[in-house]
């Protein structure tokens, strides 16, 4: 065989061997690497990343570029390194599912841990408290349960703590109030119970405090009025009781105050009118009583005010026409009696939802009875009625009876003493109800409508 033919046969044989091998190897996945060959970060940090990948079903992550397939963890998706250490781990919105491994505590130089909007389960690892450099801890919008670890109160460098939208239970640990550098504190939308720790008022760096959508109870601590840098305070949808602390009127940097859907009672503090930076005031769906303070007209930056579904009474103050930027005002489902001209633009249908006294009350006399007539109020929905009282002039009012509903426009008062002057009055009642749109937890009474003069009933003829 000639040398030329020998070379051609050798080439053909090699090509055939290559073709025979390719189909078998083409379907093989790249081998997973262990941390043994990694030098970019300390071994313990690489193992912490591996543990996270394994514990949270890494094979199903939306983006797992580089994870366990290269020996350069600093290039893995979501990993940032600085000076030979993992400094940031951002795997938000990436389909992580399962519990967080204890090995995360080995990321000694970690500054940012962002795992929000995944499907993480189990507890928040108490070992995260060993991450002394941590500035941002965001585990929001997962399915984490159990108590908030008290040990997190030792994270002296922490500036953002967001554990919102999970299934955390128990109380708010007082140890967290030691986080002197914390600016954003968000434990909203969990199942937390118990009181708001008054010591939160000492967290001077706070700009945001969000404890909404829990089961917190007790009073709003007046100490929150000491948070001079606070810009947002959200305590809505809890079971808070008692009065709104007037001290909140001292939060000169506050832009949003949301106390919606609690059981707060008493009057609206006039001091809230001092919140010159406030753009949103939401006090709706509580048990607030009394008149709307005229001082709210001093809220020069306000854009929206929600006072609906309380038990407010009296007249809407003219001063609410003052804020030039006020775009939305909801006063529905109260017992307000009248309003200024600007309500035609801000809340044009306010009177259609008010439990107010009926108008145009008159009485027609006949022997020992009187027929009362009035104009029914616009708000005739939900269970309610008119209560009718009478008295001899100078005497004590006695309830004679009630109507079947709020659409009734007359009532017959019988059994009156002849030859005696009488006075009559009528007021409106609406029962508490938990149906939309009001979600009204208050049983509302209006002011009284009274007959314009004392009415004299003639003596009955004695024949």
Image: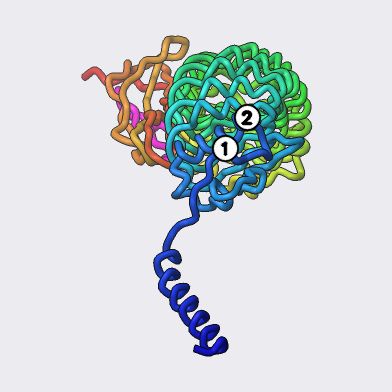
**Residues under numbered marks 1 and 2 in contact, where contact means CB atoms less than 8 Å apart:** no
Few, some or many C-alpha atoms within 10 Å of disc 2 (few <14, some 14-19, many ≥20)? many
Q: In which image quadrant can residue 188 be found?
A: top right
The location of residue 375, given as percent across then percent down, is 43, 40
Q: Residue furthest top?
A: 395
Element assignment for label 2: loop
Nearer-the-camera pick, 130 or 419: 130
Pointer 1 residue: 36
Looking at the picture, does residue 218 appear above or below residue 112? above
Q: In which image quadrant can residue 403 be found?
A: top left
Give the residue displayed 21% in from the left and 19% down from the top.
463
Give the residue displayed 56% in from the left and 89% down from the top.
4
Numbered badge on residue 107: 2
Looking at the picture, does residue 462 appear above or below residue 301? above
Q: Which residue range is magenta in the image? A: 362-379
Nearer-the-camera pick, 122 or 72: 72
The disc, 1 or 2, on the residue closer to the chain's N-terminal end is 1
Numbered badge on residue 153: none
The location of residue 410, given as percent across then percent down, is 35, 36
Give the residue displayed 56% in from the left and 26% down from the top.
211
Q: Is residue 282 left or right of residue 122?
A: right
């Amino acid at each position: 065989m000639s040398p030329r033919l020998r070379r051609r046969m050798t080439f053909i044989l090699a090509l055939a061997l290559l073709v025979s091998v390719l189909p078998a190897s083409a379907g093989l996945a790249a081998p997973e690497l262990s941390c043994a060959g990694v030098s970019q970060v300390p071994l313990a940090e690489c193992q912490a990343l591996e543990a996270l990948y394994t514990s949270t079903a890494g094979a199903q992550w939306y983006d797992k570029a580089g994870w366990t397939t290269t020996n350069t963890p600093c290039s893995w998706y979501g990993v940032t390194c600085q000076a030979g250490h993992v400094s940031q781990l951002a795997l938000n919105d990436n389909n992580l599912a399962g519990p967080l491994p204890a090995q995360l505590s080995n990321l000694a130089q970690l500054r940012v841990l962002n795992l929000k909007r995944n499907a993480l389960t189990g507890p928040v690892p108490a070992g995260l408290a060993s991450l002394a450099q941590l500035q941002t801890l965001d585990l929001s919008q997962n399915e984490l349960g159990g108590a908030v670890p008290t040990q997190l109160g030792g994270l002296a460098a922490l500036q953002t703590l967001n554990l919102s939208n999970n299934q955390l239970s128990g109380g708010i640990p007082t140890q967290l109030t030691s986080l002197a550098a914390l600016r954003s504190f968000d434990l909203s939308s969990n199942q937390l119970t118990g009181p708001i720790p008054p010591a939160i008022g000492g967290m001077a760096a706070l700009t945001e405090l969000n404890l909404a959508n829990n089961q917190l109870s007790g009073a709003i601590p007046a100490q929150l009025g000491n948070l001079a840098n606070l810009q947002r305070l959200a305590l809505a949808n809890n079971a808070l009781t008692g009065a709104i602390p007037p001290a909140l009127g001292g939060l000169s940097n506050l832009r949003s105050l949301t106390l919606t859907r609690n059981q707060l009672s008493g009057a609206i503090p006039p001091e809230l009118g001092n919140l010159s930076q406030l753009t949103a005031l939401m006090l709706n769906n509580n048990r607030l009583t009394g008149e709307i303070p005229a001082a709210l007209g001093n809220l020069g930056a306000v854009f929206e005010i929600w006072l609906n579904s309380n038990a407010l009474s009296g007249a809407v103050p003219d001063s609410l026409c003052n804020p030039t930027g006020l775009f939305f005002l909801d006063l529905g489902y109260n017992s307000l009696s009248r309003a200024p001209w600007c309500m035609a633009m801000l809340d044009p249908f306010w009177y259609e939802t008010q439990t107010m006294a009926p108008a145009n009350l008159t009485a027609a006399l006949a022997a020992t009875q009187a027929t009362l007539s009035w104009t029914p109020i616009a708000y005739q929905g939900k269970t309610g009625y008119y209560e009718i009282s009478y008295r001899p002039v100078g005497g004590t009012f006695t309830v004679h009876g009630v109507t079947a509903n709020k659409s009734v426009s007359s009532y017959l008062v019988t059994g009156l003493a002849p030859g005696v002057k009488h006075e009559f009055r009528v007021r409106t009642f609406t029962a508490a109800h938990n149906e939309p749109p009001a979600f009204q937890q208050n049983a509302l009474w209006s002011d009284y409508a009274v007959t314009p003069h004392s009415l004299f009933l003639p003596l009955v003829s004695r024949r």
